Image (cartoon, rainbow, N blue to C red):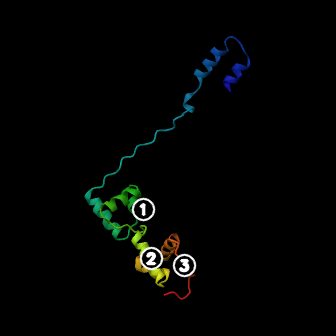
């Protein structure tokens, strides 16, 4: 806007005036890079904290609760638990488990009974049956 006014009246000093107007601009309002991101270092857990983390998870605490308790990211909690050999809840079924689901469901068991035997929900059973193109029966038709 300032430069447009200066160039609208052509005089020999136009360039000089434009340069002086440019130098007078407040450059703090033109922060191109934005604020610098703060670098976060990974928090190291002591052996005592790691032990209590595993115990709390096995007692039923969620990954999110533990992350809030320790002030770390939930993905860090998951990684540390897996490193300790803890079987994670709500993990995806293995291919062997899916094969067993297909076999049990194909033998006549309901999705609920199949899920109970494999250790997953009926919805998970049905989801994996659909992904393997197994025909499912309508619900509530007297399945075992």
The answer to which quarter of the image holds residue 19 is top right
* Quadrant location of the N terminus in the rendered image: top right
Name the front one of labels 2 and 1. 2
Point 49% across, 80% down: residue: 111
Q: Could you tell me residue 20's position as x and y percent? A: 60, 18
> Dot 3, crowdedness within 10 Å: few (<14), some or many (≥20)?
few
Point 57% across, 27% down: residue: 26
Give how far apart the Cα atoms at labels 1 and 3 are: 35 Å
Point 46% across, 82% down: residue: 113
**Which residue does the numbered mark 3 point to in the structure image?**
136
Q: In the image, is residue 122 above or below residue 142?
A: above
Q: Could you tell me residue 123's position as x and y percent? A: 51, 74
Q: Secondary structure at mark 2?
A: helix
Of callouts 2 and 1, the N-terminal one: 1
In the image, which disc is placed on residue 101? 2
Q: Could you tell me residue 101's position as x and y percent? A: 44, 76
Number of numbered labels in the structure image:
3
The foreground one among 27 and 79 is 79
Horizontal relation, residue 107 to residue 69: left or right = right
Q: Could you tell me residue 140's position as x and y percent? A: 56, 85
Q: In the image, is residue 31 above or below residue 96?
A: above
Of callouts 3 and 2, the N-terminal one: 2
The answer to which quarter of the image holds residue 16 is top right
**Which residue does the numbered mark 1 point to in the structure image?**
64
Q: Secondary structure at mark 3?
A: loop
In the image, which disc is placed on residue 133? none
Name the front one of labels 1 and 3. 3
Q: In the image, is residue 127 above or below residue 18?
A: below
> Dot 2, crowdedness within 10 Å: few (<14), some or many (≥20)?
many
Horizontal relation, residue 89 to residue 142: left or right = left
Q: Secondary structure at mark 1?
A: helix
Give how far apart the Cα atoms at labels 2 and 1 are: 30 Å
């Amino acid at each position: 806007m300032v430069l447009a006014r200066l160039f609208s009246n052509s005089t020999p000093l136009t360039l000089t005036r434009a340069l002086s107007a440019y130098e007078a601009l407040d450059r703090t309002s033109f922060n191109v890079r934005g604020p610098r991101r703060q670098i976060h270092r990974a928090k190291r857990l002591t052996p005592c904290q790691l032990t209590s983390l595993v115990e709390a998870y096995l007692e039923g605490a969620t990954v999110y609760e533990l992350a809030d308790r320790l002030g770390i990211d939930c993905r860090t909690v998951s990684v540390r638990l897996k490193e300790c050999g803890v079987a994670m809840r709500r993990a995806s079924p293995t291919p062997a488990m899916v094969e067993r689901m297909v076999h049990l469901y194909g033998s006549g068991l309901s999705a609920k009974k199949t899920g109970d035997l494999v250790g997953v929900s009926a919805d998970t059973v049905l989801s994996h049956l659909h992904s393997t193109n197994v025909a499912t029966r309508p619900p509530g038709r007297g399945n075992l």
